[in-house]
Image (tube, rainbow, N blue to C red):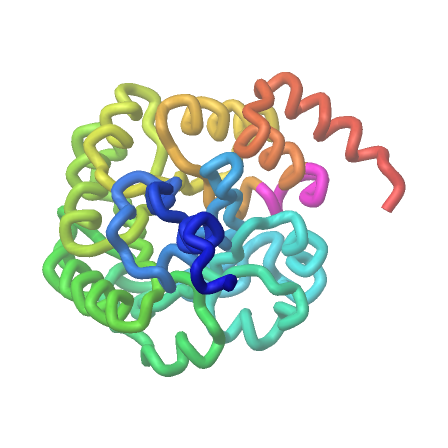
Amino acid sequence: MADNDTTKDAAEYGIGIPVPRHPFFLKGLDHVDWGMKNRLSRIFSPKSGNTVMLAFDHGYIMGPTSGLERMDLSMPPLIEYADCIMCTRGALRSIVPPTSNKPVSLRYSAGTTVLTDLNDECLIDIEDAIRVNASALAVMVAAGSRFEAKTIANLVRTADLAAKYGIPALGVTAVGKELTRDARYLSLACRVCAENGATFVKTYYCESDFEKVTATCPVPIVIAGGKKLPEDETLELAYRAIQQGASGVDMGRNVFQAGHPVAMIQAIRAVVHERRSPKEALDLYQTLQHAKP
């Protein structure tokens, strides 16, 4: 009788075969919940371990920005090449096709603009973040500024809600006019974000000792593009950051203000995911400029 076939029974139950273990591919995040890992696996490529995020949330503090005057025209052609988009809920609902199926890092804090004193911020409603299916909640943290305590409190509240609903919290380090963009400051700011519950951190690259910034942050770091650079310098920036431990980039102006934005985001992808050299990526950029749409 089949029920008495001990050989078959042992095979079906896998007796003697160890249970497979599946360590998570992003550093410091082995113990987060399944839902959070699922969302992170959409933002970051499990193959390369990195991400190319496309940021176009600038208008929430700057209003119409060069290249974003008509987001409905400039952004949709770029979205298909991004691993994740970072935007406000207003832009998301207005110009991002729901069928794009891209994970959204939602700008979850809002407040003062460039007209006054930046970083005096509040949080939006978690229910609205869930309603738009956010894959991450991005919150500004202004370490060293007069709004340090308020923005850290915003991050703590966001991390609590993120853990409750399985949505990663992204701590975004602010750099104001009075703050120095060096390894000492960036290491402090990133570590503060991580220790207060950020699942991953967005910060700036610095020319000296950036590897110390990534080494001392226990969760993944993605770098901001910052001000517009020439295309070759943008690719060099992305390359150096990845080589020194960053897990990707979150660029805006260096993509949508480029001479050829669609070609630029593809060249950045070559650096981030394929570890192409800056020269190889620049050659790709120049080739793609002339490609037929």
Q: Is residue 121 rendered magenta in the image?
A: no
In the rendering, at what x and y percent does residue 174 appear? Answer: 28, 49
**How many labels were placed on the picture?**
0
In the rendering, at what x and y percent does residue 225 appear? Answer: 46, 40
| Horizontal side, residue 151 vs residue 271: left or right | left
Q: Residue at x 61, y 64 (%)?
A: 101
Q: Which residues are magenta?
A: 255-263
Which of the 4 image quadrants contains residue 76?
Answer: bottom right
In the rendering, at what x and y percent does residue 95 appear? Answer: 63, 70
In the rendering, at what x and y percent does residue 210 appear? Answer: 30, 25
Residue 201 in view of the camera: yes
Q: List the single residue furthest toward the front.
A: 1
Q: Residue at x 41, y 37 (%)?
A: 247
| Above or below, comparing residue 64 to residue 210 in the picture | below
Q: Residue at x 42, y 22 (%)?
A: 243
| Horizontal side, residue 99 vs residue 127: left or right | right
Which of the 4 image quadrants contains residue 118?
Answer: bottom left
Which of the 4 image quadrants contains residue 260?
Answer: top right
* Near-viewer residue (282 or 129): 129
